[in-house]
Image: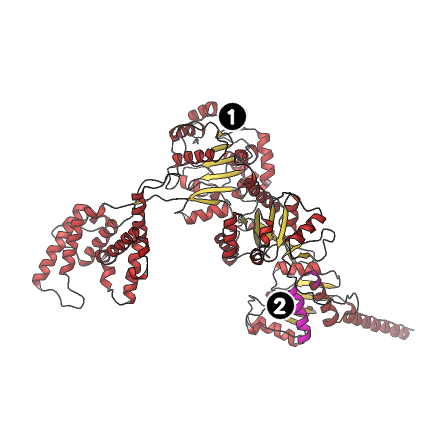
Amino acid sequence: MKKKQLLIGGGIAVILLLLFGVWNLWFSATKVAFINYQVISLGQISKANDNSFIKISELSTDDLNRLAGYDMVFINAMGLRITEEQRAQIQKAADGGLPVLTTAATNPANKIISLDSIQADILKHYLSNGGRRNYRSMLNYVRVHIDKKLFSVSEPEAVMKRADDVLYHMDPKKPEDEELGFNTVAGYNTFLQHNGLWKENAPRIIVTGPMGEPSGLIAKLEETGNMVYPIRSMRSFIQNHGIDSVRPSAIINMAHGRMGEPIVDYLAKQNIPLFSPLNVNRLVEEWERDKMGMNGGFMSQSIVTPEIDGAIRPFALFGHYKDEEGLQHAYAIPERLETFVETVNNYIALQRKPNSEKRVAIYYYKGPGQNALTAGSMEVVPSLYNLLQRMKREGYKVDGLPTSSKELEQMIQSQGAVFGSYAEGAFDRFMETGKPELITKEQYESWIKKSIRPEMYAVVVAANGEFPGAYMTTSDGRLGVARLQFGNVVLLPQNAAGSGDNAFKVVHGTNAAPPHTYIASYLWTQFGFKADALIHFGTHGSLEFTPRKQVALCSNDWSDRLVGALPHFYIYSIGNVGEGMIAKRRSYAGLQSYLTPPFMESSVRTIYRELTEAVKTYNNLLPADGQAVLSTGNKDALNRASLAVKKLTVKLGIHRELELDSLLTVPYAEEDIQRIENFAEELANEKITGQLYTMGIPYEPIRITSSVYAMATEPIAYSLLALDKLRNRADGQVEKHRTLFTQSYLEPARDVVTRLLADPSLASDELI
């Protein structure tokens, strides 16, 4: 009996083993691994997969020991970085029978393929042509013809050639199906009309570039009243004049890198704003925790090069999310999408709205009390007054503007002041007579809910107490915001972004959250005043230096939240490029440059003329290179010449600057006199600025001329020296003695500039 039972049990076990083997051989899931594929590409492949018996995984190069667990491996070798050991792991698995297909190998050693040529070519064609149908067929091909499974199999379709359609759009009736393609704007417009997406006189927005998954963005733009034109190739769309039929109000380029000069030229001529939203290229939660936001090569491609094209608003829009299988997908971040689309709509509305209806908030920077308004290299109040006058002439509603900049300055001091914590009496008078905007707790908290995350606001309360805090408050619990309003234009002082005695640190960034007054001012601009545009006036304020990320900001960053969706413009010095970049990237500012002060002719040379002549006398007595040591008589003459230089040096006080002695009986050494010579010559050639720049007032011709001399002479001189070095016409003495450089190169360079100013047609190689 037991023997019979054992035989039956053994038979069952054998059958189960056979069934398991059969299941594994013909019926089990097909496991496909992808190595070094972009998240967007792999996400599209994953979306195309409708077969639950095909399992897709992303495999890192650190997990190559798991290759044996897969039935097929795809490797994108473009930019693949693997060690010799890792390459050997892949090769060993391929030699052992694992189907491997490597594409786009820039390094021949990485081109590992274990499929036959027919299978490899078919899979490559599916990959290169892309699209849901091709990706779906590719996966089915792997299951049927490579993994050779018999269950849950769909015969793959033939490769669909990549659509060379110019425009595309998801089919609203079949959102999971292949995107529809269109070769003409007319055909696309007909599609919009048939699907309820046509809106007469609506803004038209072009969306292009492969670095973000556009479906959510397109849907949100359409939902908010726009017509969207998704373009596969922007260059061909412009070259074939398709864009002329669209006449877009804005272009959103999701690709990183440059679009190219022809496209930029077209956008500039047509005055079309270019938006370049960012893909943070990692999991959203990782990016939010990062204090930097973005760096390295990805930053240069995603932020720096689009800036060269004139792109605005480097706004983090796309990020990565994991699905149930652990695969990452690139999607628009929901709360970021809302703000970004609102921003685009606001820029378009600004284009379309009459100037008389536009509401503009202008922030200026000033110190507390009676301190003047400040901005680098600018006369602030006259410039601000000229701007307001110009706005009035352009049709903006600027009511009640005073008759002079002096009157405006007086109004700012009385109604648009900033107060230190010490100025209790002045503050009380201001609250009574300065006409501040008074904000209630209910208003403030409603704005906070719209803009500021609870965890951010908790930090504000921890640092400053509950609303309204201890600054700019009334006895009934309201918060005062200083401002001057002229019709639809409001002027606001930028309050201190922090507290403490270190003014530089408060302006250039602290780690503390800004106080209620600072936050309330910007939120009132957004929601109370309902500004159409935000302007910061002059270099620079503190908004772009508030805490957290450097670039690719998130919704936990103060400058991101306080600008919100407002179009932002910054009147910024053309001479401060570094901090201007910070303003562009951390406060989404479009920079409007103003000029630096003009350069003036230096009058210092006459002061040092006698000293310069004494130095020349000394230098003429020095032995030439390679000559014998001086005789006793010549040494005495050299010492007398040195003492003459020393007497003048001490008289002019130069010895103190150079930390030299003042004993008039002891001659200076040659190296000391060389230092004196170069110092005096440097001062004589020093660029001296004239008056501060006032917007709207051109420089006098004499100032323009002197600035040209100051900016052009030295580059020409050093270029001439470089040419002479190449021709072996310059020796070491020229660079050793500054006066010699002036005589031999600076003065001839100045002569070149003089001739070119008199006759620009002389500009040629022969001139030099």
Question: Magenta span has 299?
Answer: no
**Residue 718 at x, y = what percent?**
30, 58
Query: Label 2 to label 1, Cα distance in Å?
Result: 67 Å
Toward which corner of the image does residue 52 lie, by quadrant? bottom right
The residue tagged with tag 2: helix, strand or loop? strand
Residue tagged 1: 474
Which of the two discs, 2 and 1, labels the residue nearer the N terminus?
Answer: 2
Visual colour scheme: secondary structure
Is 98 rendered above or below residue 234? below
Q: Residue at x 19, y 55 (%)?
A: 673
**Residue 639 at x, y = what percent?**
11, 57
Q: Residue at x 60, y 37 (%)?
A: 449
Q: How many numbered badges does the structure rendering display?
A: 2
Toward which corner of the image does residue 426 lie, by quadrant? top left
Tag 1: Cα neighbours inside 10 Å, few (<14), some, or many (≥20)? some
Q: Is residue 702 left or right of residue 84?
A: left
**Residue 679 at x, y = what percent?**
24, 52
Quadrant (top left, top right, bottom left, bottom right) of the N terminus: bottom right
Stretch in magenta: 117-133
Most common secondary structure along the magenta stretch: helix
Q: Is residue 148 visible?
A: yes
Tag 2: Cα neighbours inside 10 Å, few (<14), some, or many (≥20)? many
Instruction: Give the farthest residue toward the left.
Output: 633
The residue tagged with tag 1: helix, strand or loop? loop
Residue tagged 2: 75
Q: Which mark is residue 620?
A: none
Labels 2 & 1 near each other (Cβ < 8 A) = no
